[in-house]
Image: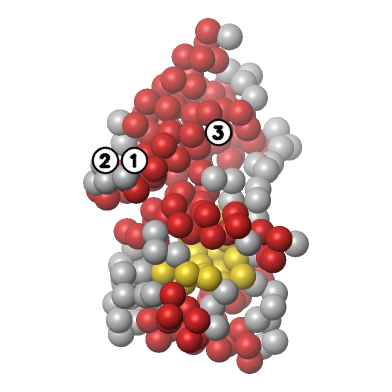
């Protein structure tokens, strides 16, 4: 038990210290220690990243710190997911989300934080990166059997590409298949309503709350 608690403490500390190398090392230690890996993910990585997200919402830490913590968790989770798959297991998930920054926009900080918070709150997240065209959002959602398509736009000029995704879904008769959410600095609820998105989130914690509150709508 002591070894287990020590490893969990190392995992938690790696997130709180924003240390990707330490997160990888702790994850490898957990994977070879005979621990319950699902518990290790929850206690070691998910709980501290959620706590940091809440601290960020209270303005107790700054965005760069949250980004570094998210990067550390992502590095550690890659090891954990491989280890869980190797023993024939799988991470429990509330739902599958594809997320990306829309076409023409190279900003990824906010999107990365949202992806990390969703992952730490039990969602399986596939980050498509930046400058993602409408067709790729939809193709990825189909191939990954996604429940949610999340689109970020950090420029007022690229908000229009969020609308393109919604319109393409409508044209393909897929509007009811995916729950669509939009966000980003220039995006507001009025814009989400105008383009027919299913939801709007102003930040990472809000995105988690939005999906949690509407699971009965989109969960398959």
Q: Which residue is mark 2?
A: 60
Q: Secondary structure at mark 2?
A: loop
- Mark 2 vs mark 1: which is more N-terminal? 1
| Residue 202, position as x, y percentages in the image | 39, 64
Front position in the image: 28 or 131: 131
Using the rendered image of the protein, determine whether residue 146 is visible from the camera's viewpoint.
no
Q: Are marks 2 and 1 in contact (CB under 8 Å)?
A: yes
Q: Quadrant of the C terminus?
A: bottom right
Q: Residues within 10 Å of mark 2 (few under 14, many from 20)?
A: few
Q: Quadrant of the N terminus?
A: top right
| Residue 99, position as x, y percentages in the image | 49, 64
| Residue depicted at x 50% and y 37% | 46
Front position in the image: 9 or 78: 9
Q: Mark 2 and mark 1: span between their CA atoms?
A: 5 Å
Q: Mark 3 and mark 1: span between their CA atoms?
A: 20 Å
Residue lying at the far top of the rendered structure? 2
Q: Is residue 199 left or right of residue 220?
A: left
Q: Which residue is mark 3?
A: 41
Q: Secondary structure at mark 1?
A: helix
Q: Mark 3 and mark 2: span between their CA atoms?
A: 25 Å
| Residue depicted at x 34% and y 31% | 16
Query: Height in image: 46 above or below 220?
Result: above
Q: Which residue is mark 1?
A: 55
| Residue 86, position as x, y percentages in the image | 67, 36
- Mark 3 vs mark 1: which is more N-terminal? 3
Using the rendered image of the protein, determine whether residue 67 is visible from the camera's viewpoint.
yes
| Residue 160, position as x, y percentages in the image | 40, 86
Front position in the image: 123 or 50: 50
Between circles 3 and 2, the one closer to the viewer is 2
Q: Are marks 3 and 1 in contact (CB under 8 Å)?
A: no
- Mark 3 vs mark 2: which is more N-terminal? 3
| Residue depicted at x 39% and y 59% | 203
């Amino acid at each position: 038990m002591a070894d287990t608690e020590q490893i969990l403490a190392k995992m938690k500390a790696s997130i709180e210290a924003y240390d990707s190398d330490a997160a990888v090392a702790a994850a490898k230690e957990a994977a070879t220690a005979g621990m319950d890996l699902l518990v290790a993910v929850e206690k070691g990585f998910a709980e501290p990243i959620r706590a940091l997200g809440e601290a960020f919402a209270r303005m107790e830490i700054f965005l760069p710190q949250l980004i570094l913590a998210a990067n550390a968790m992502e590095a550690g989770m890659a090891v954990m997911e491989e280890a869980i798959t190797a023993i024939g297991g799988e991470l429990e998930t509330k739902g599958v989300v594809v997320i990306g920054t829309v076409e023409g926009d190279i900003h990824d900080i906010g999107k990365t934080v949202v992806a990390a918070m969703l992952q730490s709150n039990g969602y399986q997240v596939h980050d498509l990166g930046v400058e993602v065209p409408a067709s790729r959002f939809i193709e990825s959602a189909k191939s990954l059997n996604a429940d949610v398509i999340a689109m970020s736009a950090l420029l007022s000029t690229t908000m229009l590409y969020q609308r393109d995704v919604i319109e393409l879904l409508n044209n393909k008769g897929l509007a009811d298949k995916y729950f669509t959410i939009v966000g980003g600095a220039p995006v507001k609820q009025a814009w989400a309503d105008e383009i027919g998105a299913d939801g709007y989130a102003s930040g990472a914690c809000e995105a988690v709350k939005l999906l949690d509150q509407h699971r009965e709508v989109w969960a398959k």
